[in-house]
Image (spheres, rainbow, N blue to C red):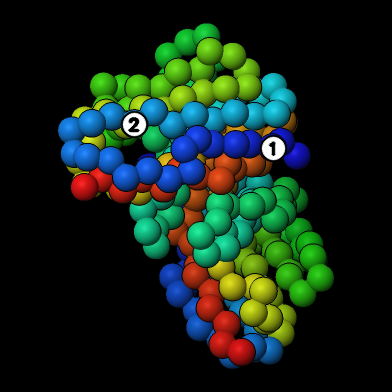
Amino acid sequence: SAVISQKPSRDICQRGTSLTIQCQVDSQVTMMFWYRQQPGQSLTLIATANQGSEATYESGFVIDKFPISRPNLTFSTLTVSNMSPEDSSIYLCSVDAGSTDTQYFGPGTRLTVL
Amino acid sequence: GQQVMQIPQYQHVQEGEDFTTYCNSSTTLSNIQWYKQRPGGHPVFLIQLVKSGEVKKQKRLTFQFGEAKKNSSLHITATQTTDVGTYFCAGPHNQGGKLIFGQGTELSVKP
């Protein structure tokens, strides 16, 4: 199974600022995903990070608010821009486990916006 | 759009009691997956079911995939405090490699 790390693990930010979250995998993977999980809620997919091309965003999420980079097959970043308290959440990256459709998740980044 | 629904949302049991969570998809799935998220943790893959009517066991956990490949269940026999967490089912979206997650069932176990 893939080992995934995320930085930072948690942060407290001021309204109007931006935070970039990093996701590093210990092996090359085809697909990387970014999710948001609000307290007590399920996982909401923000976007699929594509290597060498623009990310594919889900309905309700836009590139200007959540720009994503995927410079290679082991790394991706998600930026939460111009933050408001409504952006307070846990942000999780995940990767595909090969040809099985299953996913491995990173430990998450707990974001609080004041 | 394609949806995966899960019930119940919460389940509180006494240690030693059984627990079941149910998952229903709006469409036929190629497979169904189950994940467990401990409090303060991240989702961890438990199992994948692929065949119609498939039943798989992991110790006290029994997973079933319905004949129509639209529903699934997870049953835990004689719950323990280590079973505490939220259990999610997930199915592949019919377009692309992403997953659709159910709402999750949060299990609490009273010792």
Task: Read off the chain for label 1.
Answer: A
Q: How many marks?
A: 2
- For the N terminus of chain A, the image quarter is top right
- Residue at image coords 45%, 75%: B10
Left/right of residue B60 with respect to residue B105 in the rendered view? right
- Could you tell me residue B105's position as x and y percent? 50, 68
Whether residue A14 is visible to the viewer of this picture, yes or no, is: yes
Left or right: where does residue A32 sit relative to residue A34? right
Q: Nearer the viewer, residue B60 or B28?
A: B60
Marker disc for residue A98: none
Residue B23 in view: no
The subunit carrying tag 2 is: A
- Which mark, residue A19? 2
* Residue B14 location (% of width, % of height): 59, 90
Amino acid type, mark 1? Val
Single out the mark in the foreground, 2 or 1. Answer: 2
- Front residue of this view, candidates A112 and A46: A112
Q: Nearer the viewer, residue B48 or A35?
A: A35
Q: Which structural element holds mark 1?
A: loop
Instruction: Establish whether labels 2 and 1 are both on one chain.
Output: yes
A56 lies above or below B73: above
What residue is disc 1 on?
A3
Residue B37 appears left or right of A82: right
The quarter of the displayed image where residue B15 is located: bottom right
Q: Amino acid at mark 2?
A: Leu
At horizontal 73% and vertical 70% (from top left) the residue drawn is B61
